Image (spheres, rainbow, N blue to C red):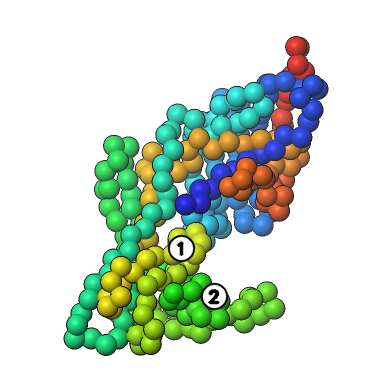
Amino acid sequence: MRQFVFIISLISSAYAFGQLKKIAGTYNDMLWGATITFREDSTFEYVSKGEHPIFYRWENFSEKGRWAISGDTLILNPQLPKKSFVESDFEEAENKGDSNLLLTFNHIKRYIDVNGNIVSTDTSQIARLDYSFNVSKKRKQTRITPRRTTRCTFAGYIPKEIITTSRTIVVHKPAENTNKIFIGCYELQGMKEFIIKNPNSNQFTLNVYSNYYLDGQIRQVKMLVKNENVIYTKQKANGAFEKDNIWYVNNAKLIRQKSGG
């Protein structure tokens, strides 16, 4: 599972600067319309009218919390334990009287209280999903979507599409035995492989869960400052920072104290 981490990368020399003394002001993401405001009372507010910072979907998001300092690193909501945001399960069944395949894809939002109890759920169609049997090749994939994909220079390869608003579809069974299915969508945050245990199975259900924690989505998120005007907002799995995820200063003010001072 891929977790969203926003990170600020401090390039100043460790010999020149020691601990952050205080930070106040607002940083802006010009592309996605998001801001994060740091206050001197160690609180922050994150607001986005575009992409959700955890699930990478177009979904309004706002959250308030607390930040702390460890050396030159800011940590957002250090008091909240880390949680899993995206989970999934895959079910298969055999209906001996059916020669077609029945595919069901559910996106389930789960709202979870501070004690870990699921207090409500909301099930909907996955916005756009690509799947293929046995091999993960673009030319073998089929796309399920409620509206046709716009064809433009930047769209890349667009597979054969099934246009539907239903969460369940019926398709012809492949001639070869099916031993795995590859499924990719934003809700899964990538392409995943699911093993088909019974080659005679002809009913498949994928449930993708987005976990919304009522006590906070931003949990132990680290942020490092590149300089007084720029922050990096996303870290790869290998720890490197994505240089194309840059937020610019609006009215932020970062004050550091010199080492030993």
First of labels 2, 1 by sequence position: 2
Asked which quadrant contains residue 181, the reply is: bottom left
Q: Nearer the viewer, residue 226 or 216?
A: 226
Mark identifier at residue 83: none
194 vs 151, nearest the viewer: 194
Q: Which residue is mark 2?
A: 137
Q: Does residue 3 lie above or below 224 as drawn?
A: below
Mark 2 crowdedness (10 Å alpha carbons): few <14, some 14-19, many ≥20? few
Q: Is residue 28 above or below residue 14?
A: below
Does residue 110 show up? yes
- Residue at 62% over, 36% down: 223
Q: Is residue 145 visible?
A: no
Going 60% across and 25% down the picture, which residue do you hit?
A: 69
Residue 192: mark:
1
Q: Quadrant of the C terminus?
A: top right
Which residue does the image show at 47% across and 52% down from the upper left? 1
Q: How many marks?
A: 2
Q: Kindly state the secondary structure of the residue where label 2 is placed.
A: loop
Residue 159 at x, y percent in the picture: 54, 81
x then y, percent, for residue 157 = 61, 78
Q: Position of residue 137 (x, y in %)?
A: 54, 75
In which quarter of the view is residue 200 placed?
bottom left
The residue lying at 68 percent from left, 74 percent from top is 154
Alpha carbon of mark 2 to alpha carbon of mark 1: how far? Answer: 13 Å
